Image (cartoon, rainbow, N blue to C red):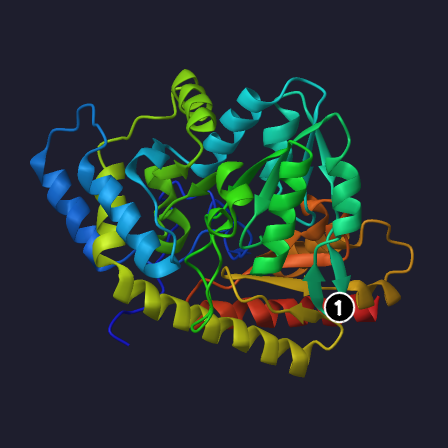
Amino acid sequence: MTYDFDTVISRKNTSSLKWNVKEQELPMWVADMDFQTAPEIIRALKARTEHGIFGYSEVEDDWYKAYISWWTRRHGLKIEKDWLVFCTGVIPAISSSVRKLTTPNENVVIQTPVYNIFFNSIINNGCRPLENALIYENGEYKMDFEDLERKLSDSQTTLMILCNPQNPTGKIWDHKSLKTVGDLCARYNVTVISDEIHCDLVAPGKEYIPFASVSENCKNNSITCIAPTKAFNIAGLNTAAVCIPNKELRYKIWRALNTDEVAEPNAFAVTAAVTAFTKGEPWLNELNSYIEANKNHVESFISENIPEIGVIKGDATYLVWLDIHKLSNYLPNVSNLSGYVVSFIRKETGLWLCPGIEYGLAGEGFLRLNAACPRRVLNDGLNRLMTAVAKIKEK
């Protein structure tokens, strides 16, 4: 490999949300990586820093060109400049969109298990999250369209938040599934917000399908949230975009983002995004290969050493979704299995994972593990997990 993903870099004392833990604890929960971003981005930010003046910034043509070129070349979606609006992050964009496109007590459909902050964006705006639970069969997830239509047809349902690719399961949605979502939402006048922040974190040889590329219904009835932040590990720089082909809908969201004051870049946001999309592709390709090798390693290690846990291997994200239902055999009186197991693992070994119940009722009985770290750190985490499960079996 040209790039180094094996060196362990301490993140202690850097105001890191992930690494603000006790000594000897190992956080593998929140979705950010323990790799330095692409060297090309670091060099560009150093050059920007050396200028020494960090006043108000604006979005220049290079930013639009970078997004347009990347999505055309890498994802086959031809974006027009007018469709793009800068925002400081995907979640601010989702929250502003929910606030603008709904009134209190309306329903917002989400497909659980799903990123837990979606619940916050809905509830904090006075709306009700309506869970369209995914169907889990034989280690695979698929959409429950019968239940989805029933919930979309409710006159109180006005919005759906789609996760594409899916977090936490790593599922890449196929063309047919996305088209069905688009057709159903158009039929019942439900607008779609498609969170596609994980779209560039896919296994080699795999590709995600942008929701807006699937059909006219998908294109004209959607708000797509995109960013380089997950793929290039620059979430702290607060740089993202919304892509909205529909002119009327775009004006509403533009107004919402500006009203909430999340539509202006900081001094580094544009530089980082432009550099990522124009110079970061070789690094990203190697990153995806490294992550895929890590995920394969997790699957092999658990299969050989912790057969009580199942690995649901997705083709996207650097997250691994773990099925721990069999552990209930050793914990018959535990009602919140995932919450109990996460607390037990952390107390006994210092390993910090995410309990599946955080992602909705359909997440109960699962854990989420972040595999985006040097292999040595990953092995440490897996050994701690093995130790904890052995202790659970002794109870």
Which amino acid type is marked by label 1?
Lys
Which residue is drawn at the image coordinates 60% and 39% (left, top)?
161
Question: Which image quarter is the N terminus in?
Answer: bottom left
- Closest to the observer, 148 or 291: 148
Of all residues shown, which one is farthest toward the right? 333
- Closest to the observer, 275 or 366: 275
- Closest to the observer, 177 or 168: 177
Q: On screen, 264 above or below 139?
A: above
Q: On screen, 342 above or below 320?
A: above
Of all residues shown, which one is farthest toward the bottom? 304
141 to the left or right of 236: right
Question: Which image quarter is the C terminus in?
Answer: bottom right
Which quadrant of the view contains residue 332?
Answer: bottom right
Residue 89: percent from left, percent from top: 41, 36
Viewer can see residue 84: no
Which residue is drawn at the image coordinates 51% and 33% (left, top)?
94
Badge 1 local density, few (<14 within 10 Å), some, or many (20+)?
few
Task: Name the residue that disc number 1 marks.
Answer: 391
Which quadrant of the view contains residue 204?
Answer: bottom left
Viewer can see residue 306: yes
Residue 151: percent from left, percent from top: 77, 38
Q: Does dot 1 land on a helix, a strand or a loop?
A: helix
208 to the left or right of 78: right
